[in-house]
Structures are given as C-alpha cells and as structure tokens.
Amino acid sequence: SVVGPNGAGKTTFIKLLLGLYKPEKGEILIDGKGMDAYSAQSLRRYMSAVFQDFKIFAMNIEENIALNDKIDVQALDESISRAQIRDRIDMLPKKEKSVIGGFFDEGDMMLSGGESQKIALSRSFYRKTDVIVLDEPTSALDVISEDKMYNSVARCSGRETILFISHRLASTRLADRIVVFEAAGIAEEGTHSELLERKGIYCNMWNAQVEKFRSKKTLSKGSSGS
C-alpha cells in the first residue's frame, strides 16, 4: 500500500511503474531488466490498473468488464465475486447481460458511484495480470463495503501483486508492506504494526483517522438519543 498526503507523488509513482511516464533519472526494473526492454503491449499484458477517472460504457455488464465480445465465463464470475458486486448483479432480470446506463431501455442498470467502482475493479481482476494497481479504488464505497472488498481481494490474491493507494488507512492493515510518501520521497516503510510502533508519520495519520471515526460515532449516538 502507498499512503501519504496529497501532492506527495503517489499517483506519479504508480504511473511511472505502469510505464505511462518515463523517469527523468534512474531506472525501473522488472525481473532484473530495465522497463525499456519491454514493449508497451507486453507491459499492458503484465499489469492492469484502476484509476479514479475510470469510464463505464453503455454496454452490458459482461462487455463492460471483459471489454471484448469473447467472454471467459469463469473469469467473469470470479472477477465479479472478487469485486463484491455479485449479489447486485444477480438481482437483475438479465444479470450479466443487463445494459448499464439507462440510455436504451428503462430496465437498464443504473449504477451508483460505488457500483461503478466495483465494475471497474471487476475489469482489472478479469484480465488476470501479474500486477494490479489500484488508485483510490474504494473512494465511493462506505466503510463496511470497502472492508468486504479488500478482504475479498486479500483472500484471492497470491497469483498477483496488488499495489494500492488509499487515504482511508483501515485497508492498509491487510498490506504486506506499506510505503509512506512525503514530498521529499519515501519517509517510512514497513507493516502496519511496525509503523504504529515507530510512532512516526503513519502512526499520526492512523491516530487522526481513528479519532475522526470515534468523533463521528459519538456524534451519531448523541443525535439519536436527543
């Protein structure tokens, strides 16, 4: 997991890893080889990403996920389940054949922001790449939905490396390694427990979010009892 304040370079960092930007100095190695040794096409087969500005198209669900008219049914089912949107799709009369957007038929599936993110996540999982990069993939999800999604991803991971940027630190507890960015570069790295013990930047960020959550919970209880 990559965390840090806005402007610290987190998104720039992952775009460098994906080959979308070229480093001005130094080099990025994949299996010991410089990134220039790989074609753009091979990098796309090796890595997939979900950014904050993803697009959902006026097609049916399976086409939105596969982005292809040749559907791998097993991969489709696995990707939908991993992204925690299976129950919602199963409620639809046409299920995966349901068209998204309401542009053509009143019975089309209208997506919430969180559901759109889950379709985008399904798309990345469907490709079965070695590396999956997620840039704030759960910003439109509530805390419970986010926790379910990340736990699902963690249970199924093993065949791929997953790297994600997140401002909500509850999800970072599942990461094997957390890298904390500041404007000057990497400030800290380690596991969740190691960084809490270090009582540095990550610990301060974690405590601030915990206190914010507690304050909201207390306010909610006070409002309900008034």
Image (cartoon, rainbow, N blue to C red):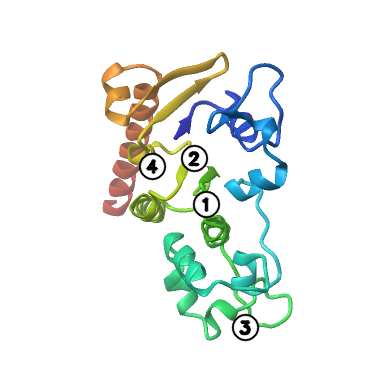
* Disc 1 element: loop
185 relative to 161, above or below: above
The CA span between labels 2 and 4 is 10 Å
The dot on residue 171 is 4
The dot on residue 107 is 3
- Give residue 51's position: percent from left, percent from top: 61, 46
Which numbered disc, 3 or 2, marks the residue that appears first in the sequence?
Answer: 3
Q: Toward which corner of the image does residue 29 lie, by quadrant? A: top right
Q: Which residue is mark 2?
A: 164
Mark 4, mark 1: which one is toward the viewer? Answer: 4
Mark 2, other Cα within 10 Å: few <14 / some 14–19 / many ≥20:
many
Which numbered disc, 4 or 1, marks the residue that appears first in the sequence?
Answer: 1
Q: Could you tell me which residue is drawn at 61 percent across and 66 percent down?
A: 66
Instruction: Decide if residue 189 is in sight here.
Output: yes
Mark 4, other Cα within 10 Å: few <14 / some 14–19 / many ≥20:
many
Mark 3, mark 2: which one is toward the viewer? Answer: 2
As shown in the figure, which amino acid type bears the numbered disc 4?
A: Ser
Mark 2, mark 1: which one is toward the viewer? Answer: 2
As shown in the figure, which amino acid type bears the numbered disc 2?
A: Phe
The CA span between labels 3 and 2 is 35 Å
Q: Are marks 2 and 4 in contact (CB under 8 Å)?
A: yes
